[in-house]
Amino acid sequence: MDLFLVNNLIWMLPLICVFAFLIIALFSQYIPTQGAIVSIGSIGIAFLIFIFVLIDFVNGGLLPIHSSFTWIDLGEWQISWGLLIDRISIVMIGLITFVAFLVQIYSVGYMKGDSRFGWYFAVHSLFAAAMLLLVLSDNLLLLYFAWELVGLGSYLLIGFWYEKKSAAEAAKKAFVTTRIGDVGLLIGIIILFKASGTFDISSIIHVAQEGGISNDVIFWSSLLIFLGAMGKSAQFPLHVWLPDAMEGPTPVSALIHAATMVAAGIYLVGRMFPLFELGPGILTIISIVGIVTFILAGAIALVMTDIKRVLAYSTISHLGLMMLSLGSFGAPAAFFHLVIHGFSKALLFLGAGSVMHGMHDQTEVELMGGLRKKMPITSITFLIGTLSLAGIVPLSGFFSKDEILISIWEYNPWFFPVTLFGVFLSSLYMIRLYCLIFLSSARSDYSEKAHESPRIMTYPLIILSVLAVFSGLLAFPSPITEWQGFAAFIDDHHKFHMVPWITAVSIVVAFSGAFLGWVIYGARKIEITAISKPFKFIYQLVSRKFLFDEIYSWIATKIVFTFARWLTVFDRVIVNDTGIDGVGNSTKKSADRLKYFQSGYLYNYSLVMVIGLFLMAIIWWVIE
Amino acid sequence: MISIDLILFFIASSLVVGGGFLVVTVKNIVYAAFALLVAMLGTAGIFLLAFADFLALVQILIYGGAVVVVILFALMLTRLEDFKGLTDNSQKPLAVLVSLTVLTIMLYAIVATAMPTSQGDAISMIDLGVSLFQDWAIPFEVASLVLLVALIGAVVLVRQDEEGR
Amino acid sequence: MTIIHFQFLSAILFSLGLYGVLARRSAVLILMSIELMLNAVNINLIGFVAFRGFGQEIQTFGQVLIIFVITIAAAELALAIAIILRIYRNKNSVNVDEMNILKG
């Protein structure tokens, strides 16, 4: 196809969503359905463009499609705005447009009757535009720009019901926590710009690989960029915002806080991976952060009783797994898991939304139970999502997890047993969640009267569950076409391969976790208290989320506020009283004194003028 | 050797200096106006001695006629009693000092840079007219425009407003 | 009769005018003093023109120049008188002692 056309089509991807945002934000009340149709239409068109571009990309031999224009020309430096389609970004675009499309359709049912129905879809469009720009941008500056816009969309949607104090607080918390990472990212970008003289990612990597950037600079800039990724992807210890982000509408959690935005950190690390490789020790740090997040969040997910919080911690945990995979040279595996986790987790969140819809917005699993009969479609699709995420064998989650385990075994064998424990936890808490919600009998009036959701909500669930079942097949090379497996699609050097014993171990671990979960929570053969009693201290610690919130609020109130108070004094006394007021006062005082020079009498002025004139003449004369 | 010219010059200059002195010293402002007239006429005499017949005429017409009349009109339009006692201000001693200093400096400068001198030619009014209306026609027109603008401005400034301000 | 006579006369007249501007209290008198100073300038100019041996052409030019000076002086006088009348109408006085609204 015509290259010119493709280049412009790429730009249409974010632009069409921006236009949708503007149209809905400005003219919401004049459009039928308050603009939802515009939003869904625009993201649908974006998905069609994705297919178009994908076909072109595959026909073009998987060569990158690049389109850019110069934004600021400083002679020596040029800052350009460019979009780049390559193997990573095409995957991300597909995930984003597809999941966003389904989630928006679902939202029509979920958000029905909300007073800010139109605004919800406007922000959704803005988010989609920002996210597409983020994965498409070819330079770090534009990426940062989109990065912040994505954060804004997340902030607006978490705090969508801002009348609720907890929602407003959660939005603030998310914004502030990710900001810590964003500052790191910005500093890292600036360091890289200073070292390489360009924002362009491929140029920076090229310069770094040629040895144009010293190891120290690579180390620190990589670390700072990784800090940004940690903030966005809710990695330990910046993970605290994501569970609270569940205050937003559930479809938002599905789209932003499970499938797309939190994946931005993974994407960023994957994008900058060639740079990270060069930094000494960076990959180890990434691995450690990833595995700590994986285990801690998995443990917390095990004791949470709020359906959305369980899923939130599960998301954090799996993001940790992706980071671990990246740290173990498993970028293709990480992206594969990103996609499959995106489908599965979006499915789970939408299922949770459906449950909440039927339960009058109750999120406490203790109040549920026995919903299997009352919500058959939700139950089945949720089960598929659960099994996929738990890594049970024929479902897609199994395949991606398997690839990650292989790369961990090859590059970070010490982490392998711990990872297996995390896998065990993962299947245990997922089965626990499913059992508590859908099995046994109703534990409250709400669950007695629960009803199935409308079709506009169940259809997206069905579509996603089909994907959650079958997308794992992408891992295999195709016997008929040129498809060499997902890993090879991301990176030619990664050939699809399996290690039989790892696969076997993985199957055993996942099944044992699932079985244990079923025994405890489904069949109720073992009392829960009997397990938690001997480990009371650990149970307490875990159920209080390892005291992160307490520690952070202590830091915030004691250290930050005290420091801020000192700064206030400094500001008031030095800056304000001495600096600003001081200048003003001294001007005023000197004016008070000097004003007596101004007699206001004409002849005084003329006398001084004449004296001055002749003094000047005399001086000139003397000099001559 | 004292020539007729020089005697006439001294007479004219004494008129100028005397008139000027009276302008800046007399208490009665009407006397000051007439002293100004004397000084102007003296200046006309000086012009005559410097071969500028036409300028002497202009001087008498404009200064001796128009300017002094305008000043007298100004005095008339304001109340004359207001000028009673309006003589010198508080910085008079300082003014004397400064003026004398300036005079000293100028006289010193004049003496210090003594210049060769030679008698000029008499200029006929025909030559002056030709020069004014041929070589300097455009500046002449511009000057007339300036006068016009000044007169319009004066009228606008003095005109009684609707509100009677 | 040489240049120096004209220069001396001009200097004396200029100083007198200057003294008038600096020492007088009435706006009209200050204006008259300014006229004196302008005359001093004219005297100086005609002295140079006539007794420096420039020749006829320059001499003619100098006289034209003086005509312009007189013209501009007349314009200035007209405006100044107008301003004085305006001030008189507003403040009912031509005393510069009372025109001190710029006093600090």
Image (cartoon, coloured by chain):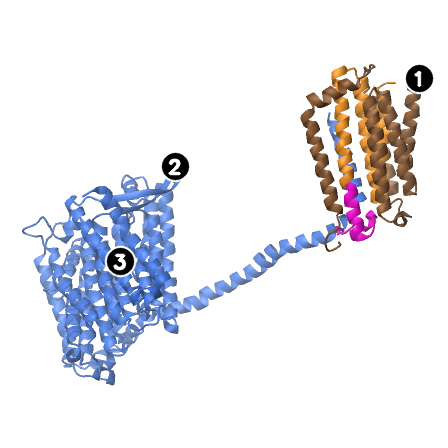
Q: In the image, residue A57 lies at what x, y percent?
A: 18, 47
Of all chains, the one bearing label 1 is B
Chain A on-screen colour: blue
Q: Amino acid at mark 1?
A: Ile
Q: In percent of the image, x 76 and y 31: which residue is there?
A: C71
Which is nearer the N-term, disc 2 or disc 3? 3
- Residue of label 3: A42
Q: Quadrant of residue A246?
A: bottom left
Of all chains, the one bearing label 2 is A
Which is more toward the observer, A130 or A474? A130
Q: Amino acid at mark 3?
A: Ser
- Residue of label 1: B4
CB-based contact (under 8 Å), mark 2 and mark 1: no
Q: Which secondary structure, mark 3?
A: helix
Q: Which secondary structure, mark 1?
A: helix
Q: In percent of the image, x 93 and y 20: which residue is there?
A: B7
Give yes or no for residue A189 being in the magenta stretch: no
Q: Are marks 2 and 3 on the same chain?
A: yes
Dominant secondary structure of the magenta stretch?
helix
Q: Amino acid at mark 2?
A: Glu
Magenta residues, start to end: C80-104
* Quadrant of image for the C terminus of chain A: top right
Q: Which chain is brown?
A: B
Q: In the image, residue A45 lies at what x, y percent?
A: 23, 56
- Residue of label 2: A76
Chain C on-screen colour: orange
Characterize the local packing of mark 2: few (<14), some (14-19) or many (20 or more) Cα atoms within 10 angstroms.
Answer: few
